[in-house]
């Protein structure tokens, strides 16, 4: 289990991650998609302790290391669709929408997700 609570990250005055909340169940593969600059890599780096969050918490329990929850960032939508148990759409430092790949790619609920998918497909 990976638990992220109210994660914020700023670089000087640039507020990049704006309160990310996320729980990932044991063994799940989560793929993060979203526009350039939305904070995907910064989020991943915070999970990997390559960046120190400005505030908020990241909990990774020992089983996560044994059973391999995985968070990946991609611009390859086909990969996201095939590899993910769950897809997360990020924009401007927030999680806008999350769900099964089928739901996100064929029936996104949020206008911002729809716009992003239309733009890149
Ligand atoms: N070390 C850093 N110092 C200052 N600003 C940074 C740093 N790392 C990232 N940023 C800024 O944070 C914002 C988010 O960047 P990030 O790399 O997380 O986006 P991304 O979603 O991974 O984009 P891309 O799809 O292009 O890889 C951008 O405005 C970027 O310039
Ligand atoms: Mg990136």
Image (tube, rainbow, N blue to C red):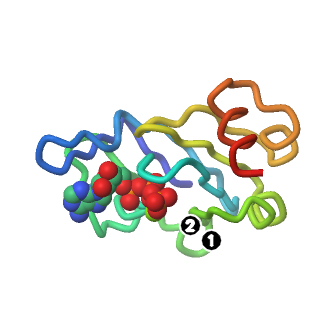
> In the rendered view, would you say 65 is above or below 98?
below
> In the rendered view, would you say 19 is above or below 28?
above
How dense is the environment of label 1, judged by Cα within 10 Å: few (below 14), some, or many (20 and up)? some
* The CB of the residue at mark 2 lies under 8 Å from ligand 1: no
Residue at the image point whose x is 62% and y is 29% from the top: 112
| Residue 117 percent location from the top left of the image | 72, 43
N-terminal of the pair, mark 2 or mark 1, is 2
Residue at the image point whose x is 70% and y is 59% from the top: 28
> In the rendered view, would you say 39 is above or below 84?
above
How dense is the environment of label 2, judged by Cα within 10 Å: few (below 14), some, or many (20 and up)? few
Q: CA distance from mark 2 to mark 1?
A: 8 Å
| Residue 7 percent location from the top left of the image | 34, 41
Which residue is nearer to you in this view: 66 or 44?
44
Q: Residue furthest front?
A: 119
| Residue 57 percent location from the top left of the image | 32, 45
SS class of the residue under badge 2? helix
Q: Quadrant of ligand 1?
A: bottom left
- Residue with the mark numbered 2: 63
Q: Quadrant of residue 80?
A: bottom right
Determine whether label 2 and label 1 are within 8 Å by CB. no
Is residue 117 visible in the rendered structure shown here?
Answer: yes
Residue at the image point whose x is 50% and y is 39% from the top: 91
- Residue with the mark numbered 1: 68
Which residue is nearer to you in this view: 45 or 11?
11
Residue 35 - label? none
Which residue is nearer to you in this view: 93 or 119?
119
Q: Is residue 39 left or right of residue 67?
A: left
Residue at the image point whose x is 69% and y is 61% from the top: 29
SS class of the residue under badge 1? loop
| Residue 22 percent location from the top left of the image | 52, 41
């Amino acid at each position: 289990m990976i638990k992220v609570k109210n994660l914020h990250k700023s670089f000087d005055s640039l507020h990049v991650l704006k309160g990310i909340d996320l729980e990932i169940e044991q063994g799940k593969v989560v793929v993060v998609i979203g526009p350039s600059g939305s904070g995907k890599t910064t989020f991943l780096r915070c999970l990997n302790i390559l960046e120190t969050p400005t505030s908020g918490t990241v909990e990774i329990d020992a089983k996560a290391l044994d059973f391999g929850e995985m968070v990946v960032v991609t611009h390859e939508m086909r990969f996201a669709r095939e590899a993910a148990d769950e897809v997360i759409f990020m924009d401007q430092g927030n999680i806008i929408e999350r769900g099964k790949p089928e739901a996100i790619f064929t029936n996104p609920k949020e206008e911002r997700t729809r716009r992003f998918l239309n733009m890149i497909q």
